[in-house]
Structure formats: C-alpha cells, structure tokens
Image (tube, helix red, strand yellow):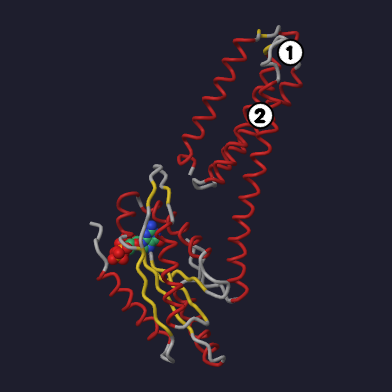
Amino acid sequence: MIRLHKWKLLFIAVLTNLTILLTLAVGEIKFWREIDWLDIVAESGVCLLAGLWLVFTLNSRPKGSVTTLLALGLGCIFIGSFQDLMDEVIAIPDASPWRGSIESVLMPVGLIILTLGLYHWHKEQLLLSQQRQRQEQDYRDYRLQDRLTGLGDARFLMQQLSQLQLRCQQQHTPLAIVLLDLDDFDTINRRYGHREGDRLLQELTEVLLLNVRRCDLVCRYAGDRFAVLLPGAGEQLAQQLGAQLQDAVAHFAYKTTRGETIYHSASTGIATDTGTPADALLTLATQRLLQAKDSRTPRVA
Ligand SMILES: Nc1nc2c(ncn2[C@@H]2O[C@H](COP(=O)(O)OP(=O)(O)OP(=O)(O)O)[C@@H](O)[C@H]2O)c(=O)[nH]1
C-alpha cells in the first residue's frame, strides 16, 4: 500500500532536505558542550514518532482526498519536529526570521490539517461500520462469511433468500434480487495480479455497501459476482436500484499500487420474487445477468 503514496513521501523528503539545507545556511553547528542531550533524546523521539505515524497511516490508506489531508498534516508535524530537533545542534542567530519559524508555523498548521483529515476519516469509517452493523443486526446469523470481503457467502445468501421470501410473502411485500458481476475482471487479475484483484474486490464491497438501502443485504455470491437482496422492492424499484449500483461501480475510481486509475463496468441481472423457490429465483437472475453480459459492447480483450 505504501507504494501508492511514493510521491507524497518523496515530497515530504524533499521538504525535509530543504529545511536541513536552509537551517545549515543560516545557522552554525553548536559546540559539543552547548548541546543538551536530554532535549535531543526527547525531540528525536517526537520526530521519530511523527515519521512512524505518517508511514503507518499511508500504509493503511488508499489514495484519495482524506489520505492527502492526513499525509499533509503528519508531514507538517514531522518537518516541524525535525526543525525543532535541528535547533538543538545548529544555532540560528536571534535576528534570523528563520529562527523557530518553521516549527511555530508548521506545527499548528499540521495539527489543524491532521484534525481535518482525522475528522473525515472518522466520518468515512462511521458510515462503513454503520452499514455493516445494520446488515449484522438485520441478518443476525452472519457466520457464513466470505473471508476476503467480510460479506455473507453464497450459502448465507441462499439461507437469507429463503427466509426473506417467506417473510415478504407473509407481509405481502415484494422482494427482488440483483446479481452484479464485474465485466472482464479476469483482465485485472492478468494485468495487475491476483492481489490487486483482491484489493479491488474489497474496495468494491465498500462501494456497494455505501450504495444500498438500510434494509438491503449484500453478499458475495462467487468470484466477482455479488448478490443484493432487496426486500420491499418490486420490478420498477429493483431496476432503479440495480442501475444505481451499476452507476456507482462505473464511477468508482480504483487506484492500483502502480498508481494507475481503473474504472470498471458491471452487468446486472434482476429478478423479482413470484413465489418460486429461492434457487429458481436465483437461476432467473443469473440468466438475465448472462443475457446482459452477452449484449454488452464493446468487450475488452
Ligand atoms: N483476485 C481475485 N480473483 C478472483 C477471485 N475469485 C475469482 N476470481 C477471478 O475472477 C475471474 C472471473 O472470471 P470470469 O468469470 O471469466 O469473469 P470476467 O473476466 O469478469 O468475464 P465476464 O464476467 O464474462 O465479463 C477469474 O479470473 C477468477 O480467477 C478472488 O477471490 N480474487
């Protein structure tokens, strides 16, 4: 993941080098006896920790505006604390505007930007965990989990589909299923490797979770095929929700570790419950999905 952010790290490294050069240009190296070693230990600790926060954060984040804010904030704090450390070994004349300026400007600016980044990160996580929690609350038996995405797997889907069919029939409400399958996903695996394909599936899961209603259930049916159960949705609403999911996938900008952006299309197959058994409903949705796959143009080689 860290390779995704090499330009941010390079930018921070260049700024740190500039800070060193400028500090050396305006100041003079202190004599041995003038150095307060306790201060050096404390300040290098702060600097090291700021650097570690930066690396850990970037290593766990995809590209995007929230990551940029976090990197910028932590970068400012790192350079500010580095300048503070250099003050301990390089004496800068009192009259120099450079004296303490980096530290006193970058530190507060860095803290403000970091706070902004953390706020947005928190909002992002809250939204995702709310969506997952809702699914767990509404569909409590969540043991049949797909390991890669954390979603329910195909067996869980069948179990839930049968139960939902029964519940919807009792409540005289419609039920629909959307099967969504990425187009030419095999190309991603071949071009970028299986791990990149795995990461794409994980991020796509979050896109789907953020684009379904509270009552819907998203499962990973197989490979690059997802199923969404839509209780209360008749033909028209199911078509609308299916199209919205397709749209969300098409607008999802996946960033590879090489730094390329991939947009991906998906095909859908939608079926509404007419009292047929769960597997027949799923077969109908699969047939419609395959029809949609056959009719799409152009096909990527
Ligand atoms: N990375 C990754 N790939 C997977 C996983 N499960 C299945 N696949 C791959 O998903 C691909 C599915 O290939 P296909 O069924 O031909 O689907 P497709 O390439 O999207 O082609 P169409 O569906 O016809 O558009 C295969 O390359 C599988 O190896 C997984 O967990 N991780």
Name the residue beneath numbered marker 1. 35
Mark in the foreground, 1 or 2: 2
Q: How many badges with numbers are in the image?
A: 2
Splitting the image into 4 quarters, where does residue 278 fall? bottom left
Residue occupying the point 43% across, 52% down: 253
Residue 131 horizontal side relative to residue 296, left or right: right
Task: Give x and y (percent) for residue 109.
Answer: 67, 33
- With 196 as the anchor, is 92 left or right in this view? right
In the image, is 158 to the left or to the right of 181? right
Question: Where 255 sits versus 51, above or below?
Answer: below
Q: Position of residue 123 (x, y in %)?
A: 63, 55
Question: Which residue in the protein does label 2 denote?
Answer: 106
Element marked by disc 2 = helix
Instruction: Establish whether ligand 1 lies closer than 8 Å to the Cβ of label 1.
Output: no
* Disc 1 to disc 2: CB gap under 8 Å: no
* Residue type (three-letter) at the residue carrying disc 1: Ile
Numbered tag placed on residue 98 in the rendering: none
- Give whichever of discs 1 and 2 has the lower sequence position: 1
Q: Secondary structure at mark 1?
A: loop
Residue 99, above or below 7: above
Depth check: 184 or 26 in front? 26
Instruction: Please tell me in which quarter of the rendered image ligand 1 is found.
Output: bottom left
Residue neighbourhood size for the residue with mark 1, other residues' Cα within 10 Å, grouped as few (<14), some (14–19), many (≥20)? some
Residue visible at 29% across and 69% down in the picture: 293
In the rendered structure, which amino acid carries the disc numbered 2? Leu
Q: What's the distance in space between the residues labelled 1 and 2, CA to CA?
A: 24 Å
Which image quadrant for residue 291? bottom left
